[in-house]
Structure formats: C-alpha cells, structure tokens
Amino acid sequence: MSLPLSGLTVLDLTHVLAGPFCALTLADLGARVIKVERPGSGDDTRAFPPFKDGKSGYFAAINHSKKSIALDLKKEADREIFDRLLARADVLLENFRPGVLDRLGYGWTDVHAANPALVYGSVSGYGQTGPDARRPAYDMIAQARGGVMSVTGEPGRGPVRAGASVGDIAAGMYLTQGVLAALYDRQRTGLGRRVDVSMLDSQLAILEHALAITTVTGKAPGPTGSRHPSIAPFESFQASDGFFVIAAGNDVLFEKLCLVLDLPVADDPRFATNAARVTNVRLLKRLIEAVTLDQTRAHWVAKLTAAGVPASQIQSLDQVLKDPQIAARNMVVDVLDRNGRAAFKAAGNPIKLSDAEDRTTRAPAPELDGNRGEILRWLDEG
C-alpha cells in the first residue's frame, strides 16, 4: 500500500503558501520533502497566528510531514550542503522573485547544467517572463489584478477578496500538476524541465465563466453574490431561519424543483430554458422565495435532496469539521507533535487512490533546522 511518490525527494525552498502547498501535496502523495529555510527565522508562516503552545497552527497545517534544514545560501559551507542535496533530489521548488536565485548561482540554467535530471519548479506572482516578472505579489494582489475580486461579492458594494487564498492555492495546484507532468516526461527523456507558474496566470485560468462572458459579449461581468451568472436557479435562497443554496443546473432539475416547491411555471416561456431563466433570474428568485420563506432550511434541503435536486445548508467551518461526509472521507486529520500526540488539525488529502493508505494522522511540522542531523546522515549514506 505504498504511496505513488514514495522514493521521490523534493527540496522545498518555498515559503508562505503557494509553493508550500505544492510541496505538501507531494508529501501527501508519498514524497520525502526537505524544507530548506532561512536560519534564525525560517518560513514567514511560523509567526502566523493562531498559536498553540507557541507553535503556529497555520504553519503546521501547510508544512506537516516535511523535514527542515536551515541553510544560508550565501555561506560556502551551507552551499556545499545544498549542492549535495541537489545531487540527491528529484525536484526543487522555489518561489523567490525572478533573478534572486540566479544571483546566488542557483537559477534554472546553472542548476540544470549541474543536475540535468532535476525538475525545477518555480512559482511567483507574475512568472519568469513579461514586463512585470520581477514585481512582488501576494494572494490579494493576484486576486485583484487577475479579475477574481471583480466578480466576488455583492452587486453595488465594494470589492471583496475571496474567502480562501485562491491566488496562492490555485498557483500551488498548477505547480503540482506541472511538476508531475515534468516527472512523467523525465521517464522518457532522462531530463528535468523547468516548470514556471504565475499566480496571475492561475487566476485567469480559473475564471471560466467570466472569460467566456467577456470575450463573447464584450462586456465584463461584475459581482453576482452567490448567483452563478450563466445558470439559474443557482444561488442562495432565504428560508424561514436563514439562507440555503439550490443548484438546479439543467432543465430536468428545474422541473423537479418546480414539483417540490409547487411552482406554477411549467408553461411559462420566461423559465422554459436555462437562458430564459438567467434573463429572468430576479423574478425567478422572488417566486422561489415566496415558497421557501414558509419553512426552515433543513426542511427544504431534505425535500430537495430526496427529489434529487442539489441543495445544501451553508455551513460554517466548525460545522464542516463535524460533517459526517467529511469524516467518512478522512478529510480532517491529526498533525502529531514530536511525542506522537495530536497537536493540530489539518485537511486530509483529497486525492484518494486505490491500494494506497489514507492515513488519519500526519507527521509533525518540523522545528526550524530540526532535521539537520537526520538529513546530513542521509546525505552521507548516499
């Protein structure tokens, strides 16, 4: 029941979120991940709240199951160790601004020449090319410039950042895909490739409906709240005790919805097709809520689910963590401390593979430089 990336070694030079998220995914799939950190302070997220017993829960959630060694790549002795790590590694991940590692002698050209089989994964705000390649960026910068904030929030109100760090996470996901593709290609060629992922590029790549609307109509969409701009009814609705969501994504589901709610619109041309329903979405919402306001969210979710119409209550994170479906899928795992006790909670691995163990615990998040001796012994054994 070995994991598919067992035996693979990843050097993780990244910090904060996009790169560490990629490294975490590779670790969850079985890779040995060696986190190379700044001496003294380490990854910025070691200082991010919330804290438990002086340790960051944020850092633990993104960096569990990794090993840590602190190296100053400007010092000759540490460079010698890093060179030995590069010679043993399959993948190097970095998220410095373009040019930083080149000045240190560890840019793609130099590393590839010395280690031609190494896959070199880079994630940055704007990528390795283009006029703004060297500009700094964070998650919200990517969401703002990439268009996500323009379609997030309620109409007529100020712009809103998405509640999850989609600028970082999307880039981390695309970096993972690129690294795995490069590893597959290496089996054929024996050579590593550079994987260049931009946070800005990744934001555009996830704006499927907004891109289609803008390029076809010539008009950029604005925020639509919880509503999908191309499907109706597909948004939140009010019940007697609060809001819940209905996603009737096709004509068959809309017909079932009408039967459950006893909506007399079966022969109304304003709602006969999805396109017509999108055009008349405000009227449709009023008609639906005229019915749903009479009963609770739980009532309507149960009735709609029984009829096969996708519907859900809007859960807070504490409710999500207790959701029986989440539990059944092992999506909340314990991050252990050095003594083997549960210290933090983290998201499980959403990639479920046949004949592979889906562990309920994760190895501890590393202390800064806490695995130096172990890593150096591993190098000597090689």
Image: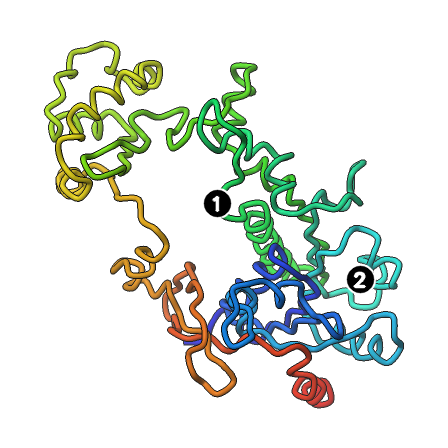
Query: In the displayed structure, does residue 226 sit left or right of residue 75?
Result: left
Query: In the displayed structure, does residue 346 sit left or right of residue 254?
Result: right
* Residue placed under numbered mark 1 in the picture: 163
Q: In the rendered image, is residue 220 in sight?
A: yes
Of the 4 image quadrants, the one containing the N terminus is bottom left
At 69% from the left and 72% from the top, the residue drawn is 89
Residue 112's disc number = 2
At 18% from the left and 23% from the top, the residue drawn is 290
Q: Is residue 188 above or below residue 201?
A: below
Disc 2 residue type (three-letter):
His
Residue 90 figure quarter: bottom right
Residue 187 figure quarter: bottom right
Q: Nearer the viewer, residue 158 or 378?
A: 158
Query: In the displayed structure, does residue 199 sit left or right of residue 352?
Result: right
Q: Is residue 375 above or below residue 260?
A: below
Residue 232 figure quarter: top left
Q: Are marks 2 and 1 in contact (CB under 8 Å)?
A: no
